[in-house]
């Protein structure tokens, strides 16, 4: 049987073929065949080329580095992805070719990462080091690839050694191979900062001063790579953010002013890299002196980038969203810069049927990030939400909730959640847009991120002010929530409990009864004892809302859980240190104490609960002090129908020292505490006057 040229080329790569020149020739033949040809790449993978390449790169004998270099270059060709026809011709602005996930999976399964890391020996051939770093950088571009090998053995130490040796050559820019390698090493470090543990290991390796050297080196591409690595190190890591913000550059300058100048660079990619780094430093709260600079420089630059193309336009909205999240002033400023019409334009032209954009991944990512930016802008300001509605982008948001991309669906939910914080939108715009059906459909989504966003959005949709509440309940929303509390993702579980809590907030007794008949008090008891404190907190909030408004509601909770079991749970929670649990447990008592004589007596029969309330009356938290006083106010509320029982309650509380404790709070620094104390003491005074115990001591 005659072998094809491709089969011959692969066979000549075997270790038994001892002629280096022929093997190099075969590698070049293969390289020329697979570049830009997905079919040929798949063919060679089926022919077993990856194991042959892995063997070549794994050989420790460096007598013929050219063979290794060519093998590494071919591996890199497999790691780099494919463009659709005519994309490079018509859309060169899309930047470096995207990686192919299937090929990268095949590469990692073939075990090429370890020998590639071993090829980064600082004393080895610089061209082999560069080729290996380039291929590793392409492999690590995939989020699916494990980063653990980099942190095993001395691989991280070797990378930092390379950065040290090569970064000193960057300023002169004489050796382009060394300059490019320094850029690649910084990029690899940036891509291997996925966890706080990885961030700390890279920082401990001594990389930060070397990245600062690259940053000050004056070569644009290495500066961008250094900014990328520094940004990855400080993201969501306040400790490293503080360290980097205080580290001096070579001339003694702090990084923030230097990076601010780079935000004004002529290169869009440099501006984006600098803006990203400053965004993460700002969110960490380590550069407060530059808040005005961020507002006046970084925000406008990011908004202008929305009008650019390619990778810069794709990433800019995501960084913008991160920068302005939870900042009302920044959200207002971005609105005034007309960011919303720009984002609306991007989303409207990114429809699935639009063939103008050649790469599906780029199109989807741009849509996702633009939706995230809209969600951030409309998070806190009603004026901003109004602008989003007026931009007529809501139909596109609704459509995006059924998008094939997980990220787009989740981002669309984020938008809906921000918009649903407006009572007006809940009553009109969102209803008119038909948000209910696609949102309900997402409750069956397989992705935890989408499910989390959908349940978080429903927390607003199920409020009483929403006309969608009734139809959502008729669709069987409670059964969905029951399913979610057994889900493996704690954020989904938390949001489900939160939504149920909102569903019964201020609801009539019959609605509460219907909800809990489906939800089940046994599930509520389990949630009150959940391993996640945040879930316990919202479960207590749920009890608080159920036992609110009237005696019938309290009776339903007592009958559903059993008064003994409920009060035992509250008794236990009042011994915890968590302030949020304490506050919500106290407010459950506050609500129970508004009920009938039976309800009040159930609390009075729990001396341990009363002692905890007395102890917490001097808690450092104002909210907890106020809650304890409300318990006392409601337990001693004047009622002529049960004057004897009321007197007995007051007497018990007085004997425990509650009245004296209240008097000690007369001078509390908080006005709300003092006002509540006055009300509570008035109850004790009335009791003494009615039962002839004389004037209380001052």
Image (tube, rainbow, N blue to C red):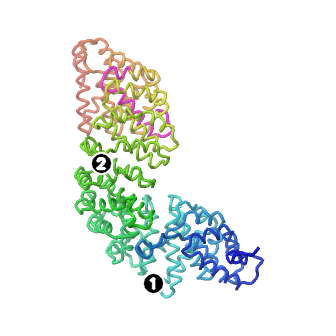
Residue 21 figure quarter: bottom right
Relative height, residue 266 to residue 656 (above, below): below
* 502 vs 18, nearest the viewer: 18
Residue 611 figure quarter: top left
The residue positioned 27% from the left and 29% from the top of the image is: 663
- For label 2, the residue is 419
Label 1: element kind? loop
Residue 283 visible? no
Relative height, residue 602 to residue 316 (above, below): above
In the image, residue 535 lies at what x, y percent? 45, 38
- For label 1, the residue is 171
Residue 648 visible? yes
For the N terminus, the quadrant is: bottom right
Relative height, residue 109 to residue 34 (above, below): above
- Quick check: is 415 in the magenta stretch? no
In the image, residue 106 lies at what x, y percent? 62, 64
Residue stretch in magenta: 528-555
In the image, residue 312 lies at what x, y percent? 38, 69
For the C terminus, the quadrant is: top left
Label number found at residue 572: none
The residue positioned 32% from the left and 58% from the top of the image is: 324
Q: Are marks 2 and 1 in contact (CB under 8 Å)?
A: no
Tell me if 476 is positioned left or right of 34 in this view.
left
* 509 vs 249, nearest the viewer: 509
Q: Is disc 2 surrounded by few (<14), some (14 to 19) or many (20+) residues within 10 Å? A: many
Q: CA distance from mark 2 to mark 1?
A: 50 Å
Relative height, residue 144 to residue 225 (above, below): above
State the predominant SS element of the stretch in magenta: helix
Q: Tell which circle, 2 or 1, labels the residue nearer the N-terminal end.
A: 1
In the image, residue 144 lies at what x, y percent? 55, 60
């Amino acid at each position: 049987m005659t072998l094809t040229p491709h089969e011959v080329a692969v066979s000549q790569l075997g270790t038994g073929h001892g002629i280096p020149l022929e093997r190099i020739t075969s590698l070049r033949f293969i390289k020329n065949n697979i570049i830009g040809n997905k079919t040929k790449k798949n063919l060679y993978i089926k022919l077993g080329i990856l194991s042959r390449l892995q063997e070549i790169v794994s050989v420790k004998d460096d007598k013929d580095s050219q063979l290794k270099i060519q093998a590494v270059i071919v591996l890199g060709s497999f790691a780099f992805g494919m463009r659709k026809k005519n994309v490079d011709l018509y859309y060169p602005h899309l930047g470096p070719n995207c990686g192919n996930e299937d090929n990268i999976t095949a590469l990692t399964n073939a075990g090429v990462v370890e020998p590639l890391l071993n090829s980064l020996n600082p004393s080895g051939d610089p061209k082999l080091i560069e080729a290996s770093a380039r291929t590793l950088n392409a492999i690590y571009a995939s989020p699916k690839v494990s980063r653990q090998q980099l942190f095993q053995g001395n691989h991280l130490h070797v990378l930092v050694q390379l950065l040290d040796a090569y970064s000193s050559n960057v300023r002169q820019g004489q050796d382009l191979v060394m300059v490019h390698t320094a850029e690649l090493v910084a990029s690899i470090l940036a891509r291997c900062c996925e966890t706080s543990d990885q961030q700390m290991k890279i920082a401990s390796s001594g990389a930060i001063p070397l990245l600062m050297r690259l940053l000050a080196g004056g070569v644009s591409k290495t500066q961008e790579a250094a900014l990328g690595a520094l940004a990855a190190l400080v993201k969501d890591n306040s400790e490293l953010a503080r360290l980097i913000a205080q580290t001096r550059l070579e001339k003694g300058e702090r990084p923030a002013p230097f990076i601010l100048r780079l935000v004004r660079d002529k290169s869009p990619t440099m501006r984006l890299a600098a803006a990203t780094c400053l965004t993460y430093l700002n969110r960490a709260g380590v550069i407060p002196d530059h808040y005005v600079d961020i507002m006046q420089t970084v925000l406008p630059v990011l908004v202008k980038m929305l009008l650019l193309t390619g990778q810069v336009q794709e990433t800019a909205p995501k960084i913008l969203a991160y920068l302005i999240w939870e900042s009302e002033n920044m959200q207002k400023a971005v609105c005034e810069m007309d960011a919303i019409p720009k984002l609306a334009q991007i989303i409207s032209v990114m429809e699935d049927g639009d063939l103008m954009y050649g790469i599906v991944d780029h199109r989807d990512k741009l849509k996702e990030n633009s939706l995230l930016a809209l969600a951030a802008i409309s998070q806190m300001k009603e004026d901003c939400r109004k602008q989003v509605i007026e931009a007529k982008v809501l139909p596109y948001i609704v459509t995006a909730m059924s998008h094939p991309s997980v990220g787009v669906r989740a981002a669309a939910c984020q938008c809906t959640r921000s918009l649903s914080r407006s009572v007006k939108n809940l009553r009109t715009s969102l209803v008119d847009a038909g948000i209910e059906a696609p949102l309900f459909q997402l409750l069956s989504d397989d992705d935890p991120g989408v499910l989390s966003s959908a349940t978080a959005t429903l927390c607003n949709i199920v409020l009483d002010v929403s006309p969608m509440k009734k139809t959502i309940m008729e669709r069987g929303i409670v059964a969905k929530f029951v399913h979610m509390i057994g889900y493996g993702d704690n954020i989904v579980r938390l949001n489900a409990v939160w939504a149920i809590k909102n569903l019964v907030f201020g609801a009539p007794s019959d609605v509460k009864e219907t909800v809990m008949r489906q939800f089940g008090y046994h599930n509520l008891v389990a949630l009150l004892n959940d391993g996640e404190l945040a879930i316990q907190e919202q479960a207590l909030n749920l009890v608080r809302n159920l036992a609110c408004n009237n005696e019938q509601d309290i009776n339903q909770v007592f009958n559903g859980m059993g008064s003994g079991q409920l009060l035992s749970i509250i008794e236990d929670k009042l011994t915890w240190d968590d302030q949020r649990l304490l506050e919500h447990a106290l407010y459950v008592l506050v609500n129970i104490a508004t009920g009938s004589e039976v309800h009040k007596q159930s609390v009075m029969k729990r001396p341990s609960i009363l002692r905890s309330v007395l102890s917490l009356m001097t808690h450092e938290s104002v909210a907890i002090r106020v809650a304890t006083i409300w318990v006392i106010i409601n337990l001693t509320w004047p009622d002529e129908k049960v004057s004897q029982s009321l007197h007995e309650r007051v007497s018990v509380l007085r004997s425990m020292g509650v009245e004296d404790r209240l008097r000690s709070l007369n001078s509390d620094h908080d006005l709300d505490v003092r006002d509540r104390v006055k009300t509570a003491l008035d109850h004790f005074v009335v009791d003494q006057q009615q039962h002839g115990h004389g004037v209380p001591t001052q």
